[in-house]
Image: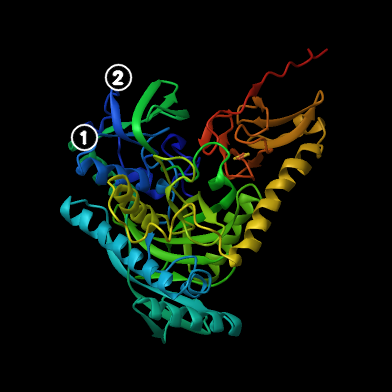
Amino acid sequence: MENRKQNSALRDSINNSPWQEAADFTGDKLSAGITETSMIYDFLVVGAGITGITTALFLQRAGLSCLIAEARQPGFGTTGGTSAHLNTFFDATYPEVESDFGEQAAKLLAVGGKEAMAMIEHFVKELDIDCDLESKSAWLYAENENETKQLQKILEASQRAGISVKPANENLVPVPFDSVIRFEGQGQFHPLKYINGLLAEFIQLGGVLQDNTRIRESSFEDGIYTAKSDSGVIRAKKICYATHVPPGVNLMSLRNAPYRSYVLGLKLKDGNYPDGLAYDMQEPYHYFRTHVIGGQPYLIVGGEDHKTGHDEPEGAFQRLKDYAGQYYAVESVVYQWSSQYYVPVDGLPYIGQLPGAEGTFVATGFNGNGMIFGTLSAKIISDLVLGKDNKYASLFSPSRMKPVAGFTEFIKENADVAWHFIADRFSSSHLQALTDLKSGEGKLVDFEGKKLAIYKDDAGKVTALNPICTHAGCIVQFNAAEQSWDCPCHGGRFDVSGKVLTGPATIDLEMVIISYDKQP
Ligand code: FES
């Protein structure tokens, strides 16, 4: 690989995505505001990704006083690691949504996808955001008879929902296919340049961005939320967790499962970059698109997703490279990065008020469609906060009953959670592992009766952490590709010194001091 482990401070990953190199949130224009601890804001947004920033902008424009509290920097989480496809078809397919929620729901979902796409286009035009936004067609292809049957159902249900899609004769990418369909009106953009533009407008309107502010806990009393961070207290009348699942153990952490997704940015020998978006139907799936960065086109290839903490990330990168190499003349792998998303139990996101917590809003379970659902969430939540009707609110309501079809998946995901609570705690490793550890490697070991997460850095220094996740007590697993400790239960992630990278955990892993006997 040419690059690219440069600046882990800009994202929840040691591997740079191409977006973070081109986006600067530290310029004068975006300097963080100062929190007035005596002030009671109308609205506090936790998390400065696409969801939080767009929501805050809508509400600031409506005349509310808003503060965004971001644990690190804007785009540090999934917005900085997305592959930035903009689609009106989703990981939950239209036939699945028709079958689980009804035909009207599928139509409404299609309208919502198109509305979110139009909102992004509108903001780009209105605010003159230079973010490489392009309209593209998208090809979805089947590689065998069984997939062709599914593809036919997707075609028909998508058309019934009002999506512009039809059969095609050719595939965008050089992958042999059995059948293929082509969606019109899809898109792609540079996610960090885009949110940078929204943030500039938000701040211009008097909104406050407070970065490096991790909200550790919040309480509600006399109609006011008090959110505590290491640097002080923020007060607001309403609060929105735009952080995937909100902190604490709640309904959202039980109804959404964390997944890692892998992406490569490739230089090709022959310049055969596809002009569009393409997706296969494998499980896990793969996708392709092209993005020009600094005048150089890159083939973006993604996929090989798996549940966080449940597979070997370096293997996923290798499989992805092998897959891309089957179809393209790869000159070099310039970027490789991974990111996290959440799969909702019944296929649709949860957007709206957190059940049983008036004035607390959440937006999560976007699956691999975060740019569109993050944007739609902003519209839904801002309407709810402003007391306006919103036609999507009930479809995505976090209090909706699970359709029966989602139930099996729900049991499966949570059975996994239970397994990790019990089995991982009682598995054993040998202390010998501590001396066997290679540079850049992490392992769980038993050490003087305690289970430890140990890591050796390039200088040979060993760090030991208590591996019990501070969210709800599962045992973290080492992610060699990201040099992080990842929790298999709800996706909390920590760097090798134990600092929280990704919620729902808000407390760092405890550092353990190891004393060594003197060598004779
Ligand atoms: Fe929930 Fe670790 S993220 S137990």
Of callouts 2 and 1, the N-terminal one? 1
Q: Is residue 173 left or right of residue 432?
A: left
Compare residues 451 and 409 and report the one nearer the observer. Answer: 409
- Residue 38's label in the rendered image is 2
In this rendering, which labeled residue sits more in front, label 2 or label 1? 2
Question: In the rendered image, is residue 273 in sight?
Answer: no
Q: SS for tag 1?
A: helix
> Is 120 situated left or right of 452 in this image?
left
181 relative to 288, above or below: below
The kind of residue on which mark 2 rests is Ser
Which residue is pictured at 24% across the width and 59% down the height? 121
Q: Position of residue 433 (x, y in %)?
A: 78, 34
Ligand 1 shows up in which quadrant of the image?
Answer: top right
* Res 8 visible: yes
Query: How far across and down, in percent of the image, does residue 112 sit?
Result: 34, 64
Q: Position of residue 318 (x, y in %)?
A: 60, 57
Image mark count: 2
Which residue is nearer to you in this view: 270 or 211?
211
Q: Quadrant of residue 462?
A: top right
Q: Is mark 1 within 8 Å of ligand 1?
A: no
Residue 180 falls left or right of residue 54:
right
Q: Which residue position is annotated with label 1?
A: 29
Work out whether residue 455 or residue 120 is closer to the camera in this orientation and state it: 120
Are circles 2 and 1 on residues that touch, CB within 8 Å? no
